[in-house]
Image: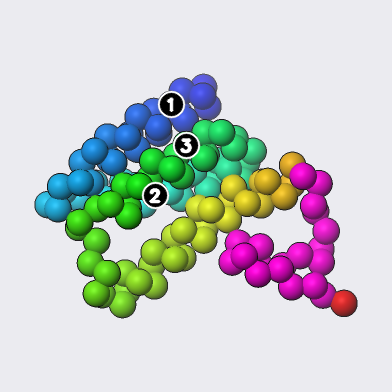
């Protein structure tokens, strides 16, 4: 059942990517939701599906002319969205590699702080 949901999410993401190329469509919001979904399923361990969703939706968000980068709220929203989505996949990768040490913190931001 979960494979069907992931398959539908990939199809929906692909349609959103095609529609996000037009500046008048709100298909980018679907890509935002699918980015969060990709981070969640990546955290659960479905890495291949999550990476496919990340690729499709990142291309849709970056290539969309409907995103106004002059707005400071957009500039704050996009990095947070990408940190959540890519962070879920990164945490799952660390879990598969066996790095479950409490010495690593702030992994999603790319900063590894060593606590003494």
Q: Give the numbered dot on residue 7.
A: 1
Colour setting: rainbow
Report the span colored magenta: 97-115
- Residue 36, compared with residue 46, is above or below; it is below
Residue hosting label 2? 58
| Residue shown at 31% from the left, 47% from the top | 60
- Residue 16, compared with residue 5, is above or below; it is below
Which element type, helix, strand or loop, lies under badge 3? Answer: helix
Which element type, helix, strand or loop, lies under badge 1? Answer: helix
Please identify the quarter of the rendering in which residue 96 is found: top right
Tag 2–tag 3 contact (CB < 8 Å): no
Residue 51 lies left or right of residue 34; in this view the side is right
Q: Position of residue 63 (x, y in %)?
A: 28, 52
Residue hosting label 3? 52
- Residue 47, compared with residue 27, is above or below; it is above
Please identify the quarter of the rendering in which residue 47 is found: top right
| Residue shown at 38% from the left, 67% from the top | 77
97 or 76: nearer the viewer: 97
Tag 2–tag 1 contact (CB < 8 Å): no
Q: Position of residue 75 (x, y in %)?
A: 35, 71
Q: How many marks?
A: 3
Q: Position of residue 99 (x, y in %)?
A: 80, 52
């Amino acid at each position: 059942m979960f494979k069907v949901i992931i398959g539908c999410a990939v199809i929906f993401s692909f349609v959103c990517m095609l529609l996000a190329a037009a500046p008048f469509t709100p298909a980018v919001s679907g890509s935002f939701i699918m980015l969060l979904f990709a981070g969640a399923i990546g955290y659960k361990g479905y890495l291949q599906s999550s990476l496919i969703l990340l690729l499709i939706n990142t291309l849709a968000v970056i290539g969309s002319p409907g995103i106004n980068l002059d707005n400071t709220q957009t500039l704050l929203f996009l990095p947070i969205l990408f940190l959540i989505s890519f962070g879920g996949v990164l945490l799952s990768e660390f879990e598969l590699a066996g790095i479950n040490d409490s010495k690593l913190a702030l992994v999603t931001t790319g900063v590894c702080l060593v606590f003494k």
